């Protein structure tokens, strides 16, 4: 499996097909809460044999051809690797739950939606996220900035791919 993909969309064709201005299309596709459903399907279709999770309430987004579970995340200003139930107002990070999540999934598929209509997609194994967390490179809650994603996670992923 490739560690990096590039999705490209035709902004003007989307705008025309949707009947809305291109700036509205950009706003929609750069909002992780909105575009995540489309990205999950685009990612699924990029890997033969992959399927969507059986429900939105599943603890993962995609199943690979061998039944492995994967989380889909968007890179915007920030990205987090802890379970979704640990993110938001009044919610707390719990290391044990984070490690349980890592043990249950093959990894994360992270799409940099800030660059839409060209969106780089990174396939990051759980083992790499665990190693970065234990080395203190993801901070205490696993929420890191986009800049840190590119200065820490992507170089480590590239080194892993080169090995």
Image (cartoon, grey):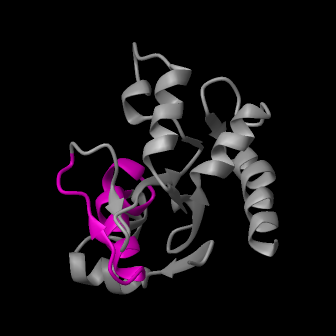
**Viewer-proximal residue among 104 and 119:** 104
Judged from this view, the residue extending furthest toward the top is 90
Q: Name the image quarter holding the N terminus.
A: bottom right
Q: Is residue 146 left or right of residue 152?
A: left
Q: Quadrant of residue 129?
A: top right
Q: Along the horizontal axis of the image, is 8 left or right of 21?
A: right
Which residues are the magenta region? 28-56
Whether residue 94 is in magenta: the answer is no
Q: Residue furthest left?
A: 55
User: Looking at the figure, which quarter contains the C terminus?
Assistant: bottom right
Q: Residue at x 18, y 57 (%)?
A: 54
Q: Is residue 58 left or right of residue 72?
A: left
Task: Indicate yes or no whether the magenta region holds residue 51.
Answer: yes
Query: Between residues 32 and 4, which one lies in front from this camera angle?
Result: 4
> For the point 72% across and 42% down, which residue is it?
131
Residue 137 sits in which quadrant? top right
Decide if residue 137 is on the left or right side of residue 102: right
Q: Residue at x 43, y 65 (%)?
A: 26
Query: Horizontal and vertical percent for residue 136?
Result: 77, 30
Whether residue 76 is situated above or below residue 2 in the rendered picture? above
Compared to residue 107, the image places residue 84 above or below, namely above
Quadrant of res 143:
top right
Residue furthest to the front: 66
């Amino acid at each position: 499996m490739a560690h990096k993909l590039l999705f490209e969309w035709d902004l003007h064709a989307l705008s025309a097909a949707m009947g809305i201005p291109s700036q509205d299309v950009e706003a929609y596709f750069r909002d992780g809460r909105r575009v995540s459903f489309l990205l999950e399907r685009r990612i699924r279709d990029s890997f033969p044999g992959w399927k969507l999770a059986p429900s939105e309430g599943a603890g993962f987004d995609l199943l690979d051809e061998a039944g492995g579970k994967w989380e889909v995340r968007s890179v915007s200003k920030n990205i987090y690797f802890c379970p979704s139930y640990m993110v938001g107002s009044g919610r707390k990070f719990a290391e044990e739950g984070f490690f349980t999540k890592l043990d249950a999934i093959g990894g994360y598929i992270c799409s940099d939606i800030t660059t839409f209509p060209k969106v780089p997609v990174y396939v990051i194994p759980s083992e790499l996220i665990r190693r970065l967390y234990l080395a203190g490179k993801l901070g205490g809650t696993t929420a890191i900035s986009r800049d840190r994603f590119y200065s820490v996670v992507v170089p480590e992923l590239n080194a892993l791919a080169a090995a």
